[in-house]
Amino acid sequence: MRFPGRRKRTHYFPVEQKNRPSFDIGISLKEQVYILGVDQLLIDIEINADEAFLEKYGLEKGQSQLIYDDVAEKIYRESKEKGYVVGEFAGGAIGNTLHNYSVLSDDRSVALGVISKQIEVGDYAYNYICNTCSQVDFSFLQPVDGPIGRAFCFITPDGERTFGISKGNMNELNAEFIPESVIRESSAVLVSAFLLRDESAPLFQSVMKTIHTAKKYDVPIVLSLGTSSLVKEKKDFLTEFIKNHVTVLAMNLQEATALTGQSDPLLAGQVALGLSDLNLITDGPRGLYLCGYVDSRNARETDQQIHSKSIPEYNRYEYSRPMRFEECDDPVTIFSHINPYMGGPGNITNTNGAGDAALSALLHDMASNAHHRSRVPNSPKHGDKHLTYSSLAQISKYCNRVSYEVLIQNSPRLSRGLPEHEESLESGYWER
């Protein structure tokens, strides 16, 4: 069974009986599978600057600070004219995840947000589009007068980094630019806690419209937590938001601890399962965890060694495919942990984007489940309603492998798909 997209490699699913009749008779292949994300479109701009330059614009060295849009424009223009700009890179957690998903699947994803109406060759909006996979659909972006968000990183000769954020128009997305039909047909809707920070901004209302529309059509809602400081700041709000709306929750251990009060990743995941149906927790050099539910009749025991940590025998049913809690008659909690691929890179130059990469792999598997269900609805894989195509254990391998690809490079985004020789992508990888 092929996954979404036009990748050359073919994937197969297991069968229990040989020579069974084809399930493909009469099935339309016109339906397109994609995910949708709402984002604050943001460009990361690296600038070589001396201390005089920082002082000129009132920037405190070594700190992160907000920059007024008019000041940001002066900084940008002067830096471009004098050749101080080292690079301009498309950024943002949702943008990174959509890009990575489209690279992995070689297929469509849809971005909602704002974009500058007037785009010049070489400016930040132009660079955002050029540095994003061409399979990311920008057709539904809202055009605005003025810049998108800009995140400046000023590098002084001593190597010190100073950060400045200019919001631009990134919070000005109006609810009228949220297309109901596109949300209805999507396999998952992806949002970030950053989008929920300012409840007075038009963006907040647009996100809530997206969420309510997704719930109306039973589309899984995926939330990526922002930073631990944001989670602490809005803990009560986020707790209720997740409990009422979120299907899949993605976070690092610091964010998970801020949300649940548990510093142990398994216990944090267990607590978070009281709020959402499936959790992805990245734990830096200790790998990542997946936590979910499965109905007892679908629980599959691992054939690997059983491990006990803060939860005894936590990985016993890691060969199970996760389900929504409400879909289970007799819900069983399932957990899987994996250490970094090949022990992790020997030299990590940038950890930014590793969590987004892991989430993109999970989303690819969720979309693959929707793809398979629409093509082969009578398959025994879809007797019950599962969230993913693969088991928790297999998804953790995939997430881990994709994160590794980001960790071995400077960019927070995948520059290519996984290597064709990669054993984990051989036919049979998706069988469990």
Image: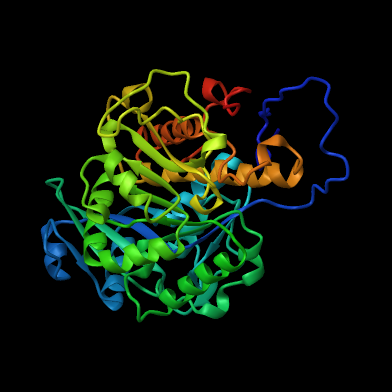
Identify which residue is drawn at 52% across, 24% down. Answer: 424
- Count of numbered circles on the image: 0
| Rendered view: 286 above or below 276 | above
Identify which residue is drawn at 53% across, 75% down. Answer: 143
Image side of residue 291 versus residue 216, left or right? left
| Rendered view: 180 above or below 358 | below
Q: Position of residue 323 (x, y in %)?
A: 53, 45
Q: Nearer the viewer, residue 294 or 24?
A: 294
Image side of residue 389 versus residue 301, left or right? right
Colour style of the rendered protein structure:
rainbow
Q: Position of residue 6 (x, y in %)?
A: 68, 39
Identify the residue at the far front of this view: 330
Identify which residue is drawn at 43% across, 18% down. Answer: 304
Q: Is residue 183 visible?
A: yes
Tell me the quarter of the image containing the N terminus: top right
Q: Position of residue 100 (x, y in %)?
A: 50, 45
Tell me the quarter of the image containing the C terminus: top right
Image side of residue 363 versus residue 305, left or right? right
| Rendered view: 254 above or below 192 | above
Q: Is residue 412 visible?
A: no
Identify which residue is drawn at 16% across, 63% down. Answer: 53
Residue 365: image quadrant is: top right
Q: Position of residue 222 (x, y in %)?
A: 47, 55
Q: Nearer the viewer, residue 193 or 146?
A: 193
